[in-house]
Image (cartoon, rainbow, N blue to C red):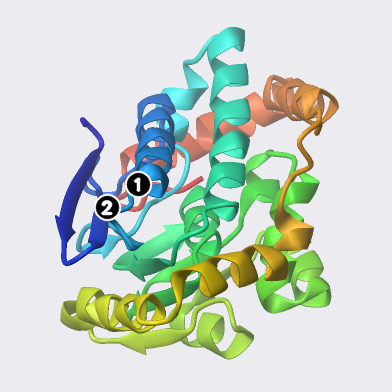
Amino acid sequence: MKTLQIKIKDGVAVVTLSRGRSNPINLEMIAELKQVMQDIEADDAVGGVIITGSEGFFSAGIDLVEAYSYNEEQSMELWSGFLNLQSVMVAFKKPMVAAISGHSPAGGCVLALCCDYRVMASGKFIIGLNEIPVGIIVPGEIFNLYSFWIGKRKAYQYLLEGKLLSVEVAYADGLIDEICDPADVLAAAEKKITAYMRLNPVTWRQSKLNLRQELLPAPDTDQTATLNLMLKQWWAPETRKTLQAIIENLKSSSLKQA
């Protein structure tokens, strides 16, 4: 694995996003994370998963610098792959906890939203979905996932505004479940996932899927129309201009976000 590190101990797999300082998501990370989730789900020796990042960053979202240079085929692969990864993670049966080690905007926030519980490091970090100001059309699947945790009204308003939340506001809104010292984030996640794993696994897993029924994609779901709209806007001149400005800013900033 080039973008992830995986450690398994006492039946818990810790998947660490490991791609540079801010863990921006590219085609390679999407493919590797999807494969890891599928492998872990099929491994009876693993009872749960913790997803975490590096100090100061969980994930800054889609790697806009790299994605901007993709051709049309790669762009389709990126966005279809990311939505497919979301579907795989939402349908993951075993306990999954996010140990959010720092900034987690956009795609990073989506990964955390797929989890059953979110522990976030205290500090001046941000989390949320800011796709619209970037020029990315928000698909219904992401709205459903966001609103599942914070309610439809807030999800609707926050998405249309591209609002990024402080740790304290994210906790108050129910986007995250726990705040702790950065040094204790992983330990807190381990405590929570251990509590989940003590429960009867068959009962827990089926109940999880029942409770997430509205989030699970139908087997015959066709995302072609959604993806075509997203890609049309992605290649629109005004979006490219916005992306160019963002990329220039990112190159001079330590915070890379999508």
Identify which residue, 123 or 84, lies in the foreground: 84
Q: Quadrant of residue 223?
A: top right
Identify which residue, 244 or 211, lies in the foreground: 211
Q: Position of residue 215 (x, y in %)?
A: 72, 57
Chain-order first, disc 1 or disc 2: 2
Determine whether, in the image, residue 187 is placed left or right of residue 165: left
Tag 1, which secondary structure? Answer: helix
Q: Residue at x 23, y 73 (%)?
A: 186
Q: Residue at x 71, y 67 (%)?
A: 210
Q: Residue at x 24, y 58 (%)?
A: 14
Taking 71 as reference, is 43 above or below it?
A: below
Q: Is residue 158 visible?
A: no
Q: Which mark is residue 15?
A: 2
Q: Position of residue 125 (x, y in %)?
A: 38, 72
Identify which residue, 229 or 160, lies in the foreground: 229
Taking 50 as reference, is 118 above or below it?
A: below
Whether residues under marks 1 and 2 lie with C-beta atoms below 8 angstroms apart, the answer is yes
Q: Residues within 10 Å of mark 2 (few under 14, many from 20)?
A: many
Determine whether, in the image, residue 150 is placed left or right of residue 200: right
